[in-house]
Amino acid sequence: MKGSILLISLILLLIMTVVVTSLAVRVQYSTAMTMGSISYTESLVKVNTAQLSYLREQASKHGQSSLVTTGLNVVSFSYYDSEHQLGFLGESACKRTNAASATQTFSCRHLQLVSGTNFGKSELGRLDISSVVEQPVLNLSGGN
């Protein structure tokens, strides 16, 4: 009898060890996934904030804004710990009503602003946000 009780208790101990080990591994995977999600969310907030701050700063510069003075080249810069690229897409009529600009005085410069950052373990993740900015400028060609 004593030998069978010892054998049964060892088997139960082995089963409990396997269950606890598998639960520990599952918790480790859950923690890693949660940390990855938190890192992604922080990066998203950081890049959105950097992009909006840059656009607000450029709006306050009026005619000296890089949104107006950027030529056909792609401009790369770092702002708020994120990398940014500002590129010229084209110039066309603004998305306004004719009553707002009946004489076609304004055209709109379309610029693409791509902002990105690395995140996660060993900075292996990459998050990029692309926005198109429509900037009204004086139409020098005299109409469409």
Image: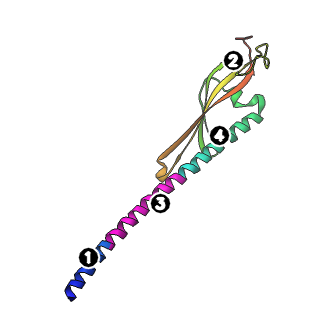
Instruction: Compare residues 52 and 62 and report the one nearer the observer.
Output: 52
Q: Amino acid at mark 3?
A: Thr
- Distance, label 2 to label 3, CA atoms, is 51 Å
53 with respect to 130 (left or right): right
- Distance, label 3 to label 1, CA atoms, is 30 Å
45 with respect to 6 (left or right): right
Q: For numbered disc 4, what is the local secondary structure?
A: helix
Residue at image x 77%, y 28%?
Answer: 63
Q: Earlier in the sequence, mark 2 or mark 3?
A: 3
- Distance, label 2 to label 4, CA atoms, is 25 Å
Front disc: 3 or 1? 1
Front disc: 2 or 4? 2
Residue bearing the label numbered 4: 51
Q: Earlier in the sequence, mark 4 or mark 1?
A: 1
Residue 132: image location, x then y, percent: 63, 30
Instruction: Compare residues 134 and 33 and report the one nearer the observer.
Output: 33
Residue 35: image location, x then y, percent: 50, 56
Q: Earlier in the sequence, mark 1 or mark 2?
A: 1
Residue bearing the label numbered 2: 93
Q: Amino acid at mark 1?
A: Ile
Q: Quick check: marks 4 and 1 in contact, CB under 8 Å?
A: no
Instruction: Report the quarter where the C terminus lies.
Output: top right
Q: For numbered disc 3, what is the local secondary structure?
A: helix
Disc number placed over residue 11 in the picture, else none: 1
Q: Amino acid at mark 2?
A: Ala
Instruction: Report the quarter where the N terminus lies.
Output: bottom left
Disc number placed over residue 31 in the picture, else none: 3
Q: For numbered disc 2, what is the local secondary structure?
A: loop
The extreme bottom residue here reads 2
